[in-house]
Image: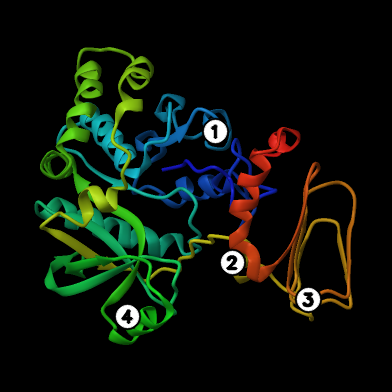
Amino acid sequence: MAGGKGERFWPQSRLRRPKHLLPIVGEKPMLTQTVERLGSVVPPEKVFIITNEEQREAVVEVCPQVPEDNVIAEPVGRDTAAAVGLATVLVENADPEATFAMLPADHVIHDAEGFQKVLEAAFAAAEAEDALVTIGITAASPATGYGYIERGEVAGEADGRKVYNVRAFREKPDAETAKAYVEAGNYYWNAGMFFWRVPVISAEFERNTPRLWEALGGIRDGLAQGTPLAPLLERHYPGLEKISIDYAVMEKAETVRVLESDFDWDDVGEWPAVERHHDKDDRGNVKKGKVVVQEAGGNIVLNDGTHTTAVIGVEDLIIVQTTDATLVCPKEKAQDIKQLVKTLGQEEAFRHLL
């Protein structure tokens, strides 16, 4: 799933080139890293990338190993349930009994080998029974920015790993609740990684969101008749119900399993998170590009332009310089960047910066 509006990492990210199309962490775009991380578990020719019209060209550019026909552009964004439903229809058209995964395009995982081992186990768990399977990320801290998965009793084993029942999915908690989750020891961060067989997820859609599934039937039937995908999407997609896969299916499904991760993971949801993945100078500054910092500490200073960004005597700022925009923001206000982008969109003079 490779959509998004490029708001939280502005001004580097834009509508046509959001976070997953940028090397926010690492030297390659995050989507490229995601595809490469799959290794031989899911070879590139079996990867579909669901994006949007504005980003499709850039996605094809950064993922040349994925067949161009497998890069699918939603004509409008209809949230994650529609994207998962579309993926189900596409995979079903290729193999009605296939097992497939839904993975976010922009997460940071350095341990590719460890990730692949858990991936293989999750596929095995999904193939072993009529269940929806997810991966739970071991909660390293009482984070309030993630949803949580409450683990129940052991339900079985896959590739030597324990498979647990999911007792409940929990919304993003307040600080006190998050601390209680971590102390309880049976809660995971929800990274939005899902695994299932086509008949299983199809049945859950039909049972829990029949209106959405019926609407997707027009795309399914058209593909079966040999109609090209693009006109089918134009005709049927805008009318799909707008709802997340969590609300539409995962929180209602009766048989959901979770495997515990043992690889590193980071969502990198806003600028302060990049500190965890870059070296710092002796004053705790993260610097990238043509940057000079003097008598300053704890700053993130990024410059992808050709001129120099010089910083003197400031603390704990985010300073991001591109060829056409500059952001200066206290770290504690990083969550307000999304609203700033919305404000820019309201002014004709600034809309070219979106």
Quadrant (top left, top right, bottom left, bottom right) of the C terminus: top right
> Looking at the image, can residue 110 be seen?
yes
Q: Residues within 10 Å of mark 1 (few under 14, many from 20)?
A: many
Alpha carbon distance from label 1 to label 4: 37 Å
Query: How far, Cα to Cα, is label 3 from label 4?
Result: 33 Å
Q: Is label 2 in contact with label 4 (beta carbons under 8 Å)?
A: no
Q: Is residue 281 above or below residue 220?
A: below
**Colour scheme of the rendered structure:** rainbow
For residue 216, which quarter of the picture?
Answer: top left
Closer to the chain start, of discs 2 and 4, is 4
Quarter of the image for residue 99 reads top left
Do the CB atoms of the residues marked 3 and 1 lie less than 8 Å apart? no
Please tell me which of labels 2 and 1 falls first in the chain: 1
Query: Is the residue under label 2 in contact with that under label 3 (CB below 8 Å)?
Result: no
Mark 3 vs mark 1, CA separation in Å: 35 Å
Amino acid type of the residue that numbered disc 3 sits on in the rendered structure: Glu
- Residue at image coords 74%, 76%: 298
Residue 273, labelled with which disc? Answer: 2
Amino acid type, label 2: Ala
Residue identifier under label 4:
181
Q: Are marks 1 and 4 in contact (CB under 8 Å)?
A: no
Kind of element beneath mark 2: helix
Dot 3 or dot 1: first in sequence order is 1
User: Which label number is shown at residue 55?
Assistant: 1
Q: Is 294 situated left or right of 316 in this image?
A: right
First in sequence: mark 3 vs mark 2:
2
Q: Position of residue 343 (x, y in %)?
A: 65, 46
Number of marks: 4
Q: Which residue is mark 3?
A: 315
* Mark 3 or mark 4, earlier in chain: 4
